[in-house]
Image (cartoon, coloured by chain):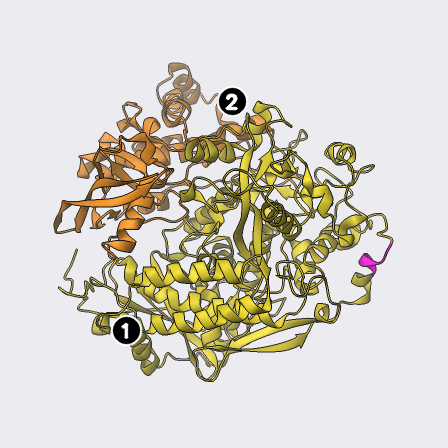
Chain colours: A orange, B yellow
Amino acid sequence: MSYDLKMRVWRGDADGGDLTDYTVEVSEGEVVLDALHRLQATQTGDLAIRWNCKAGKCGSCSAEINGRPRLMCMTRLSDFDPAETITVTPMRTFPVIRDLVTDVSFNYEKARELPYAELGPRDADGKRRMMQVDVERGQEFRKCIECYLCQDVCHVVRDHEDNKQHFAGPRFFIRYAELDMHPLDTHDRRQLAQDAAGLGMCNITKCCTEVCPEGIHITDNGIIPMKERVVDRKYDPLVWLGNKIGLRNKDNDGRTEV
Amino acid sequence: MGDRHPMTGNEMSPEARGGMERHAYDVVVIGAGGAGLRAAIAAHEAGARTAVVCKSLLGKAHTVMAEGGAAAALGNRWPEDNWQVHFRDTMRGGKMLNNWRMAQLHAQEAPERVLELEDWGALFDRTEDGLISQRDFGGHKYARLAHVGDRTGLELIRTLQQRTVQLGVDVFMECTVTEVLKQGGKVAGAFGYWRETGRFITFEAPSVILATGGIGKSYKVTSNSWEYTGDGHALALRAGASLINMEFVQFHPTGMVWPPSVKGLLVTESVRGDGGILRNSEGKRFMFDYIPDFFRAETADTEEEADAWYEDKKNNRRPPELLPRDEVARAINSEIKAGRGSPHGGIFLDIASRRDADYIRKRLPSMYHQFKELADVDITAEPMEIGPTCHYVMGGVEVDPDTQQSAVTGLYAAGEVSGGMHGSNRLGGNSLSDLLVFGKRAGEAAAAHATTLDQRGERPAVDEADVKAAQADALAPFEVEGGENPYTIQHDLQQSMNDLVGIIRTASELDASLAELEQLKQRAAGMVVEGHRQYNPGWHLALDLRNMLLVSECIAKAALARQESRGGHTRDDFPGLDPEWGAKNLVLSLDATGAGVDIAEKPLPTMPDDLKQLFEPPPAEPVEAKEADK
């Protein structure tokens, strides 16, 4: 079963652009990216789209579909009425390069500022031992495909360019959480998360969790526990007193602050 | 965004000559998948100034799609496992055509390469004892694949990506290399363009590592992404290196068949490794009808034995669903052709009736998600419809097994773009370990080569005439008036390769494919692109298409020449293995015109006697040689 789909696609570059109307033939079982590829192959060969795996695994084809941040390859046309016009625009938080392709280098710059896993030595037999239940917490965050939809939707940076300098964003808060929850890691990055990454600027509206195509509980399992850990370290009066009189906090065992 | 040329979109920078960007490095790695990143890490750690150049954003390369795991004889599940068993499985999976030395190095070094990822922060699934868990896969005697659910590739690439960033290796993202530059027969650098601006870029470097992956985009039904256009294969040919084993293309037995938009998308072998079975439309578990003599002694012939194997590997033989991929793909193909296919032209892959829903969601989360989101199928409740899909090319650049250097001094190849390691058929799980083992080796050798040249003061210089020529070649599609659209030519190429150079081949069809390729080459010569150079996918495709055509010709020519059936090459007119062909490789190189390829035969390297013993019948109890190899 095929039909003519009406689409409005943003065309332009850094200097500006407009929504352009197209009509393209689509068929059953297709996704938004299929429709755009057919446009590219038949009507507008230079339509710029960033994509790779077309299976929701690489996180390249992020855009805003009818205003909602989504992966184009995982948005099925059957979710829309065939008579409906589907509007596709580039992610708004990042500068446009051309058409639907945005300059996401903000995320790569933030990635460079991140700390890394620092594990202690291996066991005597050259292997490492961790329990499944312990690695699972970090594994949830490592499902992240770096589509940056959470960064796109986050209101801290979406309409506040100046915040970008001080705010790493949800994608990187879960990286902090992942490292903090790593069973064999030896560093304490709580202060770094608060100061350098701007964890405190997040006011947990959960928009990031809502748009995550991997269903990662960014806010509940990542950001909130991370905020609690920061608070424990920074504001808990007992911890404060303990630090003052030189009592070692068990929470810091085996970890060095960076 | 600076000043762009109004027509070309090229960003002109006052300090760069002619708008051309230039960089000097010791080692330039082309490709940022597992092999490329591992090579870059190794080169950097060896002290080389290293750059990675990749067509996509960092972290998006095709490695991300790998699902099942990385094969390494860690012995965590089965202490009986060791490198000799892995080596033997790999050679037999490749029907003994593998370069024995590569297979040996791979089996020996894979465990340490996997453990190293853990040092860098990877979080693999665990055994009950807390060790890295290992899963069953086709052709592997023991559960051997280190994995993270069914998203192992993502874990691997993210770990390597984070390590690369941590070390401060320079990465040139969305940048495509179109030529390897040489001086006096040695590598001098590479030439390419920024996808974003269309601006040209020249790298001066005595060592270039190709890590560009495969060729799957030349086929219509494929699990590969747009990047898989055989760039490294073609760059190597044009630089004067040779390719081997190009007739061997792996069709993964299980790709999605419906809906049409995801046809070819991979369904991991882990489904079968974790208990899934194949049935035809009559409900028959048909793989028992397709056990080849070569694997009969080690394959179960009853459902009872096959089902018991998952728990007790000592007293039972492997289920036939876990034969190597070439065997399973051919069997599925035969069942579909015989009219016993599923409604959408596939075969049923059933795990729902075999394992409980929790187990399936836990072990195969991506598959559950993929079928639910894209096909409205709940794999915990109903069978999947699947069929063969073009997945991997065993063939690639002919390299030295220890250093991964090609016939051209300073040009290296690692991962899927290199040839020899997998022989005529790759075992599942051997790809992720391959790219770690040989990525590291290539990176180290490339760094050492740069050091040696510098010590002798012999660093080759880039010839300006070559840069001009490369520039003209890249701009040629803009010069044509009224030519054909590259998308149409690509579409016709994919259809032609699918129909005529697919799973089952015959001389007449291969002849026809070569004739069609000639026509496609002519059409491509007059191809035109619209618009300007800034992020123009039509132009990018036009440039990639040249590589696809050259590599497709290699596959068709080699497939026509090899008159036998072996691994990923099945000839309807020459069924069965031929021992004479089993002793030689087909080597392809660029012909004198530069527009086509020549083919030659070359004897296989001879395996030393101590390794030969591993294959002597009856297959002895696994050799206890763990200590010897420490």
User: Secondary structure beneath disc 1?
Assistant: helix
Q: In this view, does B125 lie above or below B585?
A: above
Q: In which quarter of the image is the C terminus of chain A?
A: top left
Of residues A211 and B626, the one nearer the viewer is: A211
In percent of width and height, residue B4 lies at 16, 62
Q: Which residue is drawn at 31% across and 75% down?
A: B473
Q: Give the range drawn in magenta.
A: B613-617
Q: Is residue A168 visible?
A: no
Give the number of marks: 2
Give the amino acid type for the residue marked by disc 2 in the picture: Lys
Q: In this view, does B368 lie above or below B19?
A: above
Give the amino acid type for the residue marked by disc 1 in the picture: Ala
Of residues B629 and A103, the one nearer the viewer is: A103
Q: Judge from the rendering whether residue B588 lies leftward or rightward of residue B21; answer left or right.
A: right
Q: Judge from the rendering whether residue B138 lies leftward or rightward of residue B345; answer left or right.
A: right
**Distance of mark 2 from mark 1, alpha carbons?**
67 Å
Q: Which residue lies furthest to the front in this view?
A: B339
Is residue B616 located in the magenta-colored stretch of the structure? yes
Q: Label 2 marks which chain's residue?
A: A
In terms of image quadrants, where is residue B356?
A: top right
In percent of width and height, residue B210 lies at 48, 65
Res A250 label: 2
User: What secondary structure is the stretch in magenta mostly built from?
Assistant: helix
